[in-house]
Image (spheres, coloured by chain):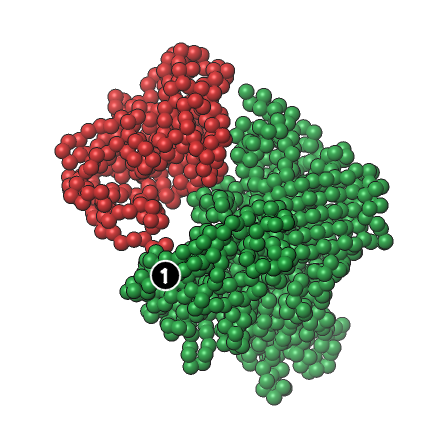
Chain colours: A red, B green
Amino acid sequence: MVLPKFDYLTPATLEEASNLLVELGAGAKVMAGGTDIIPPMRDKVLKADYLIDIKGIPGLDYIEYDEKTGLKIGALTKLYDIQTSEIVRKYNPAVAKAAKYVASTQIRHKGTMVGNICNASPSCDTGPILVAMNAKVTVHGPEKDREIPMGEFFKGVKRNALQPGEIVTGIVIPPLGEGEHAAYIKHAVRKAMDLAIVGVAAWVKMDGNVCVDARICLGAVAITPVRAPSAEKVLIGKELTPEVLAEAGVAAMADCKPISDVRASAEYRHDMVRVFTKRAVRKALEGYKEDLT
Amino acid sequence: MNRFADKEYFRKPEDFRLISKDESKYVHVDAYEKVTGKAKYAGDFMAPDMYVAKVLHSPIPKGKILSIDTSRAEALPGVKGILTGKDFPIRITEDIEILVQGQVRMVGDPVVAVCAINEEVAEAALELIDVQYEPLTPVFDPLESIKDGAVDVQGYGYNNHNFGPICHQVGSNDGKDIDEEFAKAAYVSVGDYKTHRIQHAPIEPHATYAEYDPEKVQWTVYQSTTMSFGDQHWLSVGFNMDESHFHVIRPYVGGAFGSKSNWPYSEFIACEFARRTLHPVRFVLTREEEFQTMHGRHPFIIHLETAHAENGKVLAKKTSQILDGGAYGVSHSQYAAVNLSVIWAAFPYKIDAIDLLSRRVLTNTAEGGAMRGYTACQVQFANDLNMQYAAEAMGIDPIEFRLTSALESGYHSPAGLIVTSCAFKDTLRDAAAFMRWEERKNSMKPGEGIGFAGTAFVSGTASPVLNSPNQVQTNATVRVAFNGQVSLYSNCHDNGQGADTVMVAIVAEELGLDMDEVKLIQPSTFHAGYDSGAYGSRVTFLGGNAVRRAAVDAKRQILEYVAAKWDVEPHTCDIIDHQVICRDLGHENLSMPWKQAVFGCMTTHGGDEVVGVGSYYHRTNNQQFQGKPSNYAPSYVFSTGACHLNVDVETGEIDIDEFFFAHDCGQALNRRAVEAQLEGSIYSGLGYACYEELKLRDGKMLNPNFRDYRMVTALDMPHITTKFDYPPDPEGPFGAKECGEGTTAPIAPAIANAIHMATGIHITELPLDPEHIWRMIQEQKPEKAMAALKAME
């Protein structure tokens, strides 16, 4: 199939990009790596008269860490760079792992994490861990800049919280403090190039053996990545024994509304939410070692 | 010269230089072009004045075409032609129309064709065409389709309306009676199995680039094909003109796996537009069209009953196999599907009494067709699982159980098959040894399993349909120029499997030359002799024998000349490393350089070039289709696949950590290619078993794309070990037999048997993706899986 005609614009600054978005209206789309833009345009699923490529805007490709604010990832930082970054692996290996789960090596050399969340697919691989980490996205707007908590960023299938003219400039992921652990596990049929049947991210804060706080986020089982409050409730205040983890898994099943589609049945997804909630918490406690690469 | 060629001039095994373990002088003749991207495929051909063609397909599974309005599309600037079934009423077999004329029978049926200056305009034009249908009630389930009163799938009103070909083979050895065999059986194993729908998914889709010359009334067609003479023949049938009007050229082919032994609608449409517009026309199928319209692997419904003696030996077998043929194929194009499925039903075991029935049934779904291991993957999946379950029920070790009935050299089956070279038992034993089966079989932990599967396949094919076996033959010509330069004229179809390389190697081996000294004339229907095509695992065996005979015919002429000069017997001479030598006692010191021998031979024959011709076909008949005994193939191959895996009983995921493949392919001609073919067989067998599935709803494919139709990725491949050093075949070229097609068949049953051992689930259906395994565990709750679940807690 042929890629439809469109105008390709390359603003040099965020202001310029933002103004273009306002000026050109709904027919204009922002593009970084383009891996979630070009294929659906070719398939006529996504229509864009203008593509605003922000790759020429300086200062948006970075991975930084500071003890207070945590991990900062730029809008143009490629998934492959996040996956292989020593900083990310050291301070939040679950984020590196989530980046690695996306598509394939080739695509991760083009695609960005910010693009992955802006695309707002229900099965988005980097969404759950960012929600579980209470991350924020930093946004440049035509009038003012703002921050959006990840928990409020997803609004529906392929819908996010950005207002006209707004562009995501980066992601800020709070640091893993004392006793805090995180993990993300994707369940798919293939080891690459596959969409999640279920993805589960877990963040727990431990005081000795007792869990004092927890956030679980489920991917691919609702119209957006969703928190699993029932499962979190089971975990908080308890010692994380296998029985408690199993109970949390069962509780998580009530927190999602999976559908049946060509990739899996709702019934299977439901049970996999149970299994992977349990496993994600266990993985968070175990930590990552050599299994990142 | 056919199979009774002057074999005394064949090179002796002790003189093999290229066909040996030493690969030092072996070159892959197309590697440079492919690695550098210089290789041109059909879709790469273009010209400044080229047009493109596209087709509008039926969106519904069955319906009458009420009206077609193309006026808006015709008015679109850049549109150069539009065809409907009325304008181009071509039917190439009993039931297949190039563009449907009155009724659509499946989603994807081609309805209107458009020719335009580029793809963009052609796509826009398709959207401007308005086709009105009166939907008719379809039937999707083959078991529904064969019931009395079922709707007529095609609407042609045939008597036995939803049946395509049927093959029923009944017979026995030594006057045995099948009912008596069943009556005296110690155990009768009964099973019902089902397999699913998949597609070949070659990376290069079907592509045509067609030019038409009105002065010569001649088409030149660059076609992604594995059967260029089939293309030529069916074009001549379709256009009702002699075959000499169609020059079909096969450029590089980017994979076929059985899908390109056809004559796609796109080819006819491109040719017709080229004729009408006098411009070159290119038609490349989209991936969706490839999935929907290029006849993937038949789904099967299999019932089988096997009678076993006290020691497990198979005494007799009955099967009833139903192939879901989809919407087309009542005519002879699909005879092979039912014929072959009956042959596999008795493989790879000695079964002295058989009653085997296969029927191809029509449904309003995408047409089924030939695919790598044509029907063997389905039938041998059922066969092997049934053997495994029978062994278990009788308390006999599964390797021993298979060995007891395994085919051996010299066996004549009641179906008429004659087993010549056969190392099946060795492959079973080698697999058991590699897996350390005896040592490990009783010490597996829950969730861990080893599975074996034994299968067999044909090495070359016969004539299930055609009247003469010569119609499935190969011709080859070797021309030796005055300066010693050798050209091979051969249409042996290379679809990526390495046929070009192996044919050049065969000539170089026989003539004692290096591979780069043998020039392959790139094939077309005008430039080299007939070759029936790359299907039925026939290229190396039949094509290789033809090419070898052509080379030996040329060699004989040169040796006769030299021998006369030396006054020795010509067959005591040979050509070793560019020198004619003599092996006769007392003449070992004689030698003459190749070029000198060639020039001398030519001048002695009045200046005529040395030209060697060769041909080869399998001397048999088409009686098998009538249910009568006949020996389908010139030789047969035997494989054992084995794997070790762990099952995650909570999720249904499997982790195969070791795959072993033993294949009796006789003498390997290109060891690296054989190894790659075996690994590729595991790749595609694993895809069939665990990953790939075309899902349909109301006859419409839900996943005709690479996102949701899961092909195995490199990361999903297990560690593989292969073994293929088994004795040479007496008839194959240099002793070679099939490799790479039937070798896909044991993969799925080996995996299934391992999963069965790991979990205890009783498997009867494919695919074995995580959800299906999870569901079987949930439903069957077998002891082993429950123990594994407990161990995980």
Q: Using the image, determine if residue B714 lies above or below residue B93.
A: above
Q: Is residue B487 visible?
A: no
Residue B649 location in percent, x, y?
56, 28
Residue A246 location in percent, x, y?
49, 19
Left/right placement of residue B109 relative to residue B499 reads left
Q: Is residue B607 visible?
A: yes
Left/right placement of residue B546 relative to residue B409 reads left
Amino acid found under the numbered disc labelled 1: Asp
The residue to which callout 1 is attached is B69
Residue A232 location in percent, x, y?
39, 18
Callout 1: 10 Å neighbours few (<14), some, many (20+)?
few
Q: Identify which residue is drawn at 64% across, 39% down.
A: B764
Left/right placement of residue A184 relative to residue B695 reads left
Q: Nearer the viewer, residue A1 or A127?
A: A1
Quadrant assignment for the N terminus of chain B: bottom right
Q: Identify which residue is drawn at 47% across, 47% down.
A: B701
Q: Using the image, determine if residue B83 lies above or below residue A239.
A: below
Q: Identify which residue is drawn at 69% across, 36% down.
A: B437
Q: Nearer the viewer, residue A216 or A157?
A: A157
Q: Using the image, determine if residue A115 lies above or below residue B111.
A: above
Task: Place residue B590 in its image quadrant.
Answer: bottom right
